[in-house]
Image: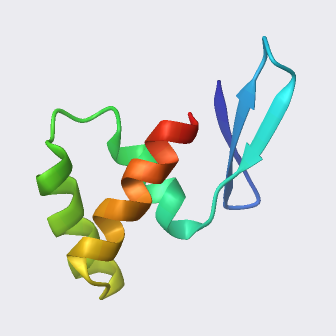
Amino acid sequence: MGSEQCDTPVLLDVNGGLCYTLNVVGGRIWGMSGEKASVAEMVKRLAGEFDAPAERLEADMGEMIARL
């Protein structure tokens, strides 16, 4: 379950009773997760939006996905 309150994305694990607050990049990753885009496509888009190295974004995405 996800929600955006005060422009901050919040993910709720109802079964586990956990709440995750995402930063701006995490919110974009979550927002793109419903699209039919590959990780490489999402990394390319994020790199352009946030002026960040693709390698760093790909590593951060992998870490975020592993935690979820």
Give above or below for 49 relative to 33: below
Residue 3: x percent and y percent? 67, 38
The quarter of the displayed image where residue 16 is located: top right
The residue sitting at 30% across, 88% down in the picture is 51
Vertical placement of residue 15 versus 40, above or below = above
* Foreground pick, 20 / 10: 20
Residue sitting at x 78%, y 16%: 14
- The single residue placed furthest to the right in the displayed view is 17
Residue sitting at x 38%, y 50%: 62
Q: Nearer the viewer, residue 67 or 14?
A: 67
Left/right of residue 61 with respect to residue 13 in the rendered view? left
Q: Is residue 46 left or right of residue 8?
A: left
The image position of residue 41, as x and y in percent, is: 12, 54
Number of marks: 0
What colouring style does the render use?
Answer: rainbow
Q: Residue furthest top?
A: 15
**Picture quadrant of residue 38:** top left
Rendered location of residue 33, percent (x, y): 35, 38
Find residue 13 and report its horizontal and vertical position in percent. 74, 24
**Apparent side of residue 41 relative to residue 5 in the rendered image (left or right):** left
Q: Is residue 28 above or below residue 2?
A: below
In the rendered image, the quadrant that contains the N terminus is top right
* Residue occupying the point 57% across, 39% down: 67
